[in-house]
Amino acid sequence: GEDVEQSLFLSVREGDSSVINCTYTDSSSTYLYWYKQEPGAGLQLLTYIFSNMDMKQDQRLTVLLNKKDKHLSLRIADTQTGDSAIYFCAEGDLNTGFQKLVFGTGTRLLVSP
Amino acid sequence: EAGVAQSPRYKIIEKRQSVAFWCNPISGHATLYWYQQILGQGPKLLIQFQNNGVVDDSQLPKDRFSAERLKGVDSTLKIQPAKLEDSAVYLCASSLDQDSNYGYTFGSGTRLTVV
């Protein structure tokens, strides 16, 4: 079955870059996603990458995909205190014929002033 | 565009009681999902609807959980009877269709505490 793993916690100082890592197991995944969850809120889609790409940049966010190692990372440049949240990596599973997202356990990012 | 609406925001019940959650997806979204998020974990899919039909309920504990999506719009998720381990946030999400590759839009969730 699918399995998505993330480190649990990351602490950085404001202005630094943050790198959140994720590994996944399903090689048939076509899309990989990063979601952000703030306290008491639902999940907000930050960005996604198609599996035939190895990098995608969107303003302060850079996603790197190493398909051979099944490793995905999210880099946040110039991290701000407002970036403090839980970040979930998710893979799109099409094995059932329908799009289904399988989420990792989440990485809690703490940004200190 | 209005987001995915869920109610109630919070619910506290005793074990063995029943509870129901409601979700109104984004207008025009054919696919609706219910996820369970236990504290400290990522969301886990419970059930997926395409219009008013179920396409995946393989992880729904059918002895106590049920869900319906009448008329292919709003959906309700019910737990009867609740157990302590059902304490979680129940997230509803919707997408344009079952092949949408651009992620889902999630509601704010219903936080259930079973005591």
Image (cartoon, coloured by chain):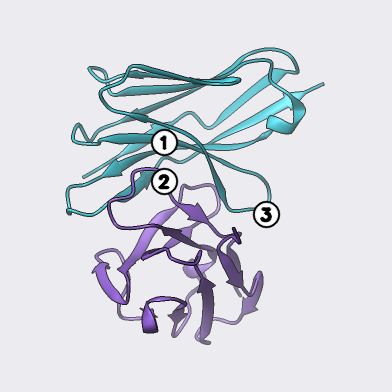
Chain colours: A cyan, B purple
Earlier sequence position, callout 3 versus callout 1: 1
Residue B64 pos. (x, y %): 37, 80
Q: Is residue B16 left or right of residue B54?
A: right
Question: In terms of depth relative to the viewer, which is nearer, B74 or B2?
Answer: B2
- Residue B87: image x %, image y %? 54, 67
On whether disc 1 and disc 2 are found on a single subunit, the reply is: no
Horizontal and vertical percent position of residue B45 = 37, 58
Task: Give SS at disc 2.
Answer: loop
Labelled pair 1, 2 in contact (Cβ < 8 Å) = yes
Q: Which residue is mark 1?
A: A33
> Disc 2 residue type?
Gly
**In the picture shown, does residue A68 fall above or below B18?**
above
Residue A24 on image: x %, y %:
31, 31
Label 1 or label 2, whichever lies nearer to me, is 2
A83 to B2, vertically: above or below:
above
Crowd tier of the residue under label 3, counting other residues whose Cα lies within 10 Å: few below 14, some 14–19, many 20 or above = few
> Marks 2 and 3, how far apart in space?
20 Å
The answer for how far apart the CA atoms under marks 3 and 1 are is 21 Å
- Dot 2: chain letter: B
* Residue indicated by mark 2: B103
Q: Height in image: A15 above or below B62? A: above
Pick out the residue farthest to the right.
A113
Nearer to us of marks 2 and 3 is 2
* Image quadrant assignment for residue B33: bottom left
Q: Front-most of B41 and A13? A: A13
